[in-house]
Amino acid sequence: MYRLGGIICNQLSDLSSVKRGPDARFFPLPLFSEVGESVVPDLKSAGYGDYYHVTGQYYDHDPSLTRNIVMKVGESFKPKVILDAALSDSEIKILSNILVDSLECRHISSGEVDSIGSEDWNYGYVLGHTFAIFSTDDIVLEQDDQNKELMQLNSRRGFPLGQKIWLKDIENVFVDLSPRPWDTQTLGIRTLSDQITVLKNERDLDVQDSNDGDGEPSHEDFGLIMMTLNGSLKQLHKLVYVATKTDSRTPQSRSMYHV
């Protein structure tokens, strides 16, 4: 296990020095001022359902803007992205009003995805009407609509069909790193019966060796690794928050964090 302790917060506090090479994934996103007029008809034509309004972690093309993604969540969760643009704080308020006025929806949940800049995202979470951890393809774990003390796991990801986890049975939620943290990052749940459920296991992160050929990532890629880890830690924190808030036991009676 790779322990980072308080280093994570210190190194993540200033990401302005994290530079990226000329990769097509990192081109600036459209500005809301450029695409905003097309949003309303797109939202109105999206149809009835559940929607996620999420932000990216860090938008380095212009720190005064925030990446905002609006997606419709289907039964199998293959998301339909309706908007992916960079917004100012005032524009985010405008977008929120547009969503309320335009969407035919049961619920709008807000959260964050693990993107940096305009790169593709892999995982995210939402917290609102319900809590969920999701990927680009499906929902990994979701709080039960009828019973908030239950977490539903997606059987399509290899979990036993209909597997559920009672929040009261969670011993801790953990993030484990391989000795070389850019090889594997794992987010999982351990129950009181010592059953471990791996929610996500990110392997072989897309990094290049540094110029000195020591087999370790460059400074730029190390920044990306930290941001991927930061996404996992946020998902862990939100899951702990939901578990301790919903469970009748007090948070002090549980050692929920394990990194």
Image (cartoon, rainbow, N blue to C red):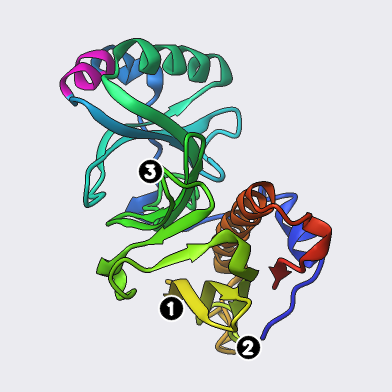
Give the Cα separation between the discs numbered 1 and 3: 25 Å
Secondary element at tag 2? loop
Quarter residue 7 falls in: bottom right
Quarter residue 152 falls in: bottom left
Amino acid under label 2? Answer: Pro
Residue at the spot 78% in from the left edge and 54% down from the top edge: 250
Residue at the spot 44% in from the left edge and 12% down from the top edge: 97
Question: Which region is colored magenta?
Answer: 39-45
Query: Which residue carries the number 3 mark?
Result: 27
Secondary element at tag 3? loop
Magenta span contains residue 122:
no
Position of residue 229 relative to residue 234, above or below, is below
Position of 86 compared to 59: left or right? left
Mark 2 neighbour class, 10 Å CA radius: few under 14, some 14 to 19, many 20 or more: few
Q: Position of residue 51 (x, y in %)?
A: 34, 33
Q: Are marks 1 and 3 in contact (CB under 8 Å)?
A: no
- Is there any visible trace of residue 168 in the rendered image? yes
Position of 215 compared to 255: left or right? left
Quarter residue 202 falls in: bottom left
Query: Which residue carries the number 2 mark?
Result: 179
Position of residue 90 relative to residue 31, above or below, is above
Amino acid under label 3? Answer: Phe
Query: Which residue carries the number 1 mark?
Result: 203
Give the Cα separation between the discs numbered 2 and 3: 32 Å
